[in-house]
Structures are given as C-alpha cells and as structure tokens.
Amino acid sequence: MANGIVLEFEKPIVELEQKILEMREFAKGESVELSHEIESLERKLDKLTREIYSNLTRWQRVQLARHPRRPYTLDYIEHLTEGFIELHGDRGYSDDKAVVCGPAHFSGRKVMIIGQQKGRDTKSKLYRNFGMMHPEGYRKALRIMKLAEKFNLPILIFVDTPGAFPGLGAEERGQAEAIARNIKEMARLTVPIIISIIGEGASGGALGIGVGDVVLMMEHSWYSVISPEGCAAILWRDAAKAPDAAEALKLAAPDLIDLEIIDRIVPEPSGGAHRDHAGAARALASTIDEYLDTLIGLSVEELLERRLEKFRKMGVFCHE
C-alpha cells in the first residue's frame, strides 16, 4: 500500500493482494498458466474486502477517515471541478492555509468551493496546520460565502478537520466568535449550500463551515462534537480508551443517518476512498449533482425555511 501504511484490519487484504501480485509475476516470468488460480484468489480477495469493510467498528472508521492517503479537498477539486481559482485572505489579518476557497465549474455549473485541507508529509502538514482553521480561516470562508451570495453561486463545502485550532493566538483573535458568526450567517445565506464530510468532522471546527441545506457524509468518515481521544481524556483521563469513546459517541455515518444529523451516506470504493480517489470523487459528484438540481429550483424563501427547519429539529429528545 502507498507509503507502506497499512491499518491493522487491512493486513489480511494487503497480504492477499501481495500474494496475487507475486503469482502474476511468477506466471509471467516462468511462462506458467496460473490464470485459474489467480481468478480464484481475486474472488477470495473481493469477498474478504467486502466482509471486512462491512463490519468495521466505529474506531476503525475513525482510523480510515485519518488515513494519510485519503483524498483531501484539493484532490476532490481536481477530480470534480474545472477552472478552480483559489482566493486568499480574510481582508483583516492573514490567509489561513488550512482552508482553500474559490470559484470553479462543477458539472457545467459555476459554483463556489470551500474546503479544509490537510497535508501528507511533515512540511505540508505544518503548512496546512493539520487542517485546523484559525479565526482568519473562518472569516476568509465567510467572505467567500458572501461573494458567492453576491453572484448567486451555489456553495460546495468539504469538511475535514480534527477541530478548530486551539492555540493561544487563535483565542486572542476571536476563535469562538468567528465560528459563531459563521453559523449565524450561513443559516441565512440566500444560495444553496451542500456540505460534504470527506474525512474528519470534529466539533465547532467542522460546524464553523458546516451549516447548509444538505449534509453528505462519505461512508468511512466521522462527525462528532469531540474527537474520541478528547472524549476519552475527559471521561476516563485516558486517551487510550478512544475506541470505547468512539462507540459511545455514535460518530459513524450510519449512526448520524439514524439520528437525522446528515442527509445521505456516499458509498466509497471497495477498500475505502484512499484506494481509489477517482472512484470516491465520482460517487460524491453524482450525489451532489442530484441535490443541486433540487435546491437550485427552490425560491429563496423555501430554501431558507427548509435550512432552518433542518437544524431546528436536531437534538429533539422525547421521553415517554
């Protein structure tokens, strides 16, 4: 696997893939007919992959969402759009590299793209601040949203963050206010907003760009008020209990569909999005396209009423 990174539950799959590869090379090098044996192993591999990925624990889904080869926002932009032009800066402090924004063409339509971006190596991780936005990042995102509203462009947002940046400087520059203002302003933007959770969706870091008409979630992503490690540290004072916290938080896509927090789970290619960026992008594009067709046909009044009602009904608890 790329970069030699193999999650524990993926090892049986990788070992079988390696065996198939070795058999093919042997057959080619020795001019031996092994097609029947190879086909048998490929069927076994397909069955094994489906079995493993259909029975993942919530913690295993968290691990997949954090896989360093998973497609990030810029990967989806590359596969989904044409003519993307990145816009920079919040016009008040600086440019936050943890979020990328700009206009593009998607499926023949002009749209505005906003997405959190992580890095894959040490240099890019530091450059992107691990996908954790500063206050100026949320203000940049809001500036771009207002620009989209001015030109009547639908907004496509990609969420992938372990949380808003918790540093002293971020607090001094108004992190909480920036997130709260975005939530307020996004609730009343007069253009369609489609949110796609493509990896991690943690806390206010995600919600600061996460209010929209439709919330989609990639099959092996997670979305919660807190990370499993953070929850474990608070409840048990032991981050090693993160797998237990993940189960309690019900942060996986099937949980959030049941709780009516998200609108649709986008299926990932066999073995996860990190194995097939293009396949993951095609699945997401098809779903976004479907919802855009519906949302663009609504009046502003209908759009806003539906959006507000969607979030009003979240968190209702009925005690019998």
Image (cartoon, grey):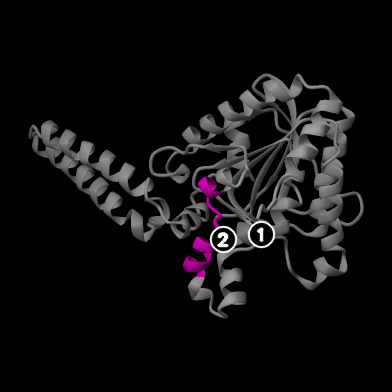
312 falls in the magenta region = no
Q: Are the residues tagged 1 and 2 within 8 Å (C-beta)?
A: yes
Residue 122 horizontal/vertical position (percent): 57, 62
Write down the region rendered in magenta: 242-255
Nearest to the observer: residue 151 or residue 123? 151
Residue displayed at 69% across by 52% down: 206
Q: Which amino acid does label 2 sit on?
A: Leu
> Label 1, on which residue?
225
Residue 218 horizontal/vertical position (percent): 54, 42
Residue 84 horizontal/vertical position (percent): 70, 32
Question: Could you say which quadrant of the image residue 39 lies in?
Answer: top left
Total count of labels? 2
Residue at mark 1 to residue at mark 2: CA–CA distance: 8 Å
**Can residue 89 be seen from the camera position used here?**
no
> Secondary structure under badge 1?
loop
**Can residue 207 be seen from the camera position used here?**
yes
Q: Is residue 23 toward the left or the right of residue 90 in the image?
A: left
Residue displayed at 62% across by 24% down: 290
Q: In this view, does 205 lie above or below 159?
A: below
> Label 2, on which residue?
249
Nearest to the observer: residue 193 or residue 235? 235
